[in-house]
Image (spheres, grey):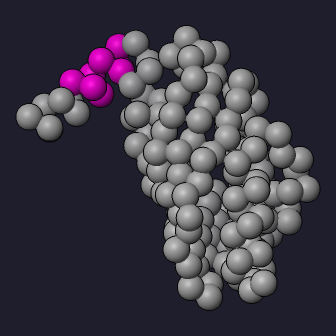
Amino acid sequence: MSTISTVIDRFVNYYTALDNQPQSAMTALYHPEAELIDPFGSHQGLFAIRRYFTHLLVNVSHCRFDIDTPLSDEQRFVVTWTMHWSHPKVAGGEALALPGCSVVTVQDGQVIRQRDFYDGGEMLYEHIPVLGWAVRSVKRRVRA
């Protein structure tokens, strides 16, 4: 099995059960100098990425990903996914689904850079009472 295939397998295994992962799994997946970028910010280094995930998952009821077959070359892969999650303070705790995509660069058998693309409004802002109304209104106007 190639290095990229091994990293892809670890990535898929990690994210398909994100809310049940031990910290050691993140250490095996991410390079110490990894960078994670998503619509909410940039996180440089394993410590910062670990802190970010800890903060995101602290009150989540569940969080897992359905991951589609990745496209890859020797040092990069792209994968589309759907995140299934719920949080007691978001949408009354109901189960939500969010589609997205990750572009991942591998170095020395670990993720060195991950850029996640998804709609932050759909994930969070649309579920905040007044702000949600405004975000949904803007989206409707753009589509019209």
Report the front residue among 104 and 35: 104
In percent of width and height, residue 91 lies at: 51, 16
Q: Is residue 135 magenta?
A: yes
Residue drawn 30% across the image and 18% down it = 133
Which SS type dominates the magenta stretch? Answer: helix
In percent of width and height, residue 123 lies at: 47, 34
Residue drawn 56% across the image and 79% down it = 72
- Quadrant the N terminus occupies: bottom right
Q: Does the magenta stretch include residue 56?
A: no
In percent of width and height, residue 106 lies at: 67, 78
Q: In this view, does 95 lie to the left or right of 27?
A: left
- Quadrant the C terminus occupies: top left
Residue 109: image quadrant is bottom right
Q: In this view, does 69 lie to the left or right of 47?
A: left
In percent of width and height, residue 98 lies at: 48, 39
Report the front residue among 65 and 92: 65
Where 92 falls versus 115 (above or below)? above
Residue drawn 51% across the image and 34% down it = 97
Q: In this view, does 112 lie to the left or right of 104?
A: right
- The reply to whether residue 48 is visible in this rendering is no
In the rendered structure, which segment of residues is drawn in magenta? 130-137
Residue drawn 67% across the image and 36% down it = 63
Report the front residue among 31 and 106: 106
